[in-house]
Image (tube, grey):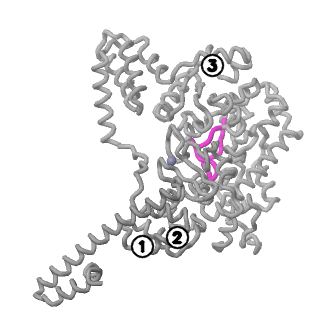
Amino acid sequence: MIPDEVIAEVLAHTDIVGLIGSYLPLKSAGRTHKALCPFHTEKTPSFTVNPERQIFHCFGCGEGGDAISFLVKHEHLGFLEAVRVLAERAGVSLPAERGGGPAAADSRVPLYEVHRLALQHYRDNLGGTHGNAARTYLEGRGVSAELIERFALGYALPRWDGLLQVLKTNGYHDRVLETAGLAIPRPKGTGHYDRFRNRLMIPIWDVSGKVIGFGGRALDSAEVKYINSPETPLYRKGAHLYGLNLAAKAIREQKTAIVVEGYFDAIMLHAHGFGNAVAALGTALTTDQARLLARYAQSVVLLFDPDAAGVGAARRSLEHLINVDLEWRIVVLPDALDPDAFVRTHGRDAFTAALAGGVDLVDFFLDRRVSGLNIGDPVQLAKCVDGLIEVIAQIESPVRREGYLTRLAQRSGITPRTLFEAIAKKRTLTRTESQPAPAKAAAPPSAEEHLLILALQSPELARRIAAALLPEDIGDSVLRQIYTTYVQAGQTCGPMSLLPPEVQPRLSALLAAERADDEAAARIVDDCLVRIQQRRAQRDRTALRQAMESAERQGNQSDALKLLANHPSMKGKTN
Ligand SMILES: [Zn+2]
């Protein structure tokens, strides 16, 4: 257990803007910084980072907290792991480390370290005599020494314990390697063996440039072509994009990302000057990946293999992509070439020209489905149109939906009205079937919230409010807790991440609220206190009436009168 004051010390040495800025592109906006929210899909940034308060808060989905909460939510770290990461960043030593105790074996810290050591080992192998065959293979693919360096390519030895031995000498247990996805337990007996053997090793990084997994390309044609790291605490399928750490800057500058399927597609595009290329690390793009791209890009060009599998993958991606606010275009390269082969055969200019020929993603499927269709055949027509309606119905923007509908009408010969009805029907159906959880809309603050916002902004107002507001005036238990802790007890906001999870976003919402000027603030306090006192009086009258009725029912008139006489409203009258 880490004492609270150490946690406070870690937070005091952490700049939340620097921390969150290493994960999201933050733009300065007055006293705060803004970005598209990583926790929900949005078009305009409502995610704010407040350096003065050292908090983040999203006005769209309501997520919020401090630097520790951010790591817990964004990086899926445990609380202690998040504290440890921040402590390391800030150079604060933690009591557990002071006592020399090792970090927990399941935390992510040793997993990063294991990946770092594995990367070094694989790179050394490729550079050494064992790496001759792998280097020859890379030469054959046109991968220069400079590219090997830039993408940190390596080689796994044709041994069962090449990596295991290295990590053992560095003091790591086999099980850490298993958790890292780099070793596999032997099916019979005890012990482990290396997952990657006799393979060209391609490190996979997260956005911040830490190695979180590997792709292994077989050098022996009898083997499975690619093996990738399994899901681990560091690597989640569908959450990362290969090469994004290297491509982020170019994507931001050009506002466009190129998404390819394979590692070597991305590598060779970088080699030919397309530094904004990333690879999907799987067949179909996920919503998480689309959101990741939306942090850097305004438009995305998808390059899928023109074969059936590639188009199928693009089709599966479609529903994840259409509502992420990016301009999606698809490019199918001629001669059934993948981007790697294409750019090596035809060169940079031909690839640029191919990119310019990209078509809108939905249009692409519209064209594919409609072309070659016998419009005279009603059964065929209905089948084709149904599939397309399904896609169009999922588009949230009415304007875009109508645009595609018009195009579908032109191509299919079906009247826009009929299509419109079909889409409307589909939308009501899917809505009732699976209503997507709407982002918690930012409701205007209640009187209690207004008071708390102002109390947290000014100690002077806090004293005034504390003198007039009773905890029981606040109906909402979370707000009441915030009031008693931070306003009545006069605590400064200590580590927010120590608060219960339901309290953190509520508190961050209050702390992130706009600052009112002094005069307006005083007026708001007056208004809110009057409203709350009216409610209190109403509540008291109701309670009194109920007590009196109950006393009268029991035939106890004198008790009822006593109740009335002792009631604060009567006292107020006689004083
Ligand atoms: Zn959000």
Q: For the N terminus, give its image quadrant.
A: bottom right
Residue 56 occupies quadrant: bottom right
User: Looking at the image, is mark 2 or mark 1 nearer the viewer?
Assistant: 1
Residue 217 or 380: which is nearer the viewer? Answer: 380
514 to the left or right of 538: right
| Residue linked to disc 3 | 355
Whole-percent x and y of residue 103? 70, 66
User: Looking at the image, is mark 2 or mark 3 nearer the viewer?
Assistant: 2
Residue 448 occupies quadrant: bottom left
Whole-percent x and y of residue 100? 77, 72
| Label 2 within 8 A of ligand 1 by Cβ | no
Q: What residue type is labelled 3?
A: Leu
Sequence-first tag of 2 and 1: 1
Query: For residue 468, which numbered disc appears in the image?
Result: 1
Residue at 43% over, 26% down: 400
| Residue linked to disc 2 | 486
Q: Classify mark 3: helix, strand or loop.
A: helix
Residue 506 or 394: which is nearer the viewer? Answer: 506
Residue 425 occupies quadrant: top left
Residue 314 or 532: which is nearer the viewer? Answer: 532
Whole-percent x and y of residue 191? 70, 59
Q: How crowded is mark 1: few (under 14 residues within 10 Å), some or many (20 or more)?
A: few
Q: For the magenta stretch, what is the residue range? A: 226-241
Sequence-first tag of 1 and 3: 3
| Label 3 within 8 A of ligand 1 by Cβ | no
Q: How far apart, in angstroms, are the residues tagged by discs 2 and 3?
A: 56 Å
Q: Classify mark 2: helix, strand or loop.
A: helix
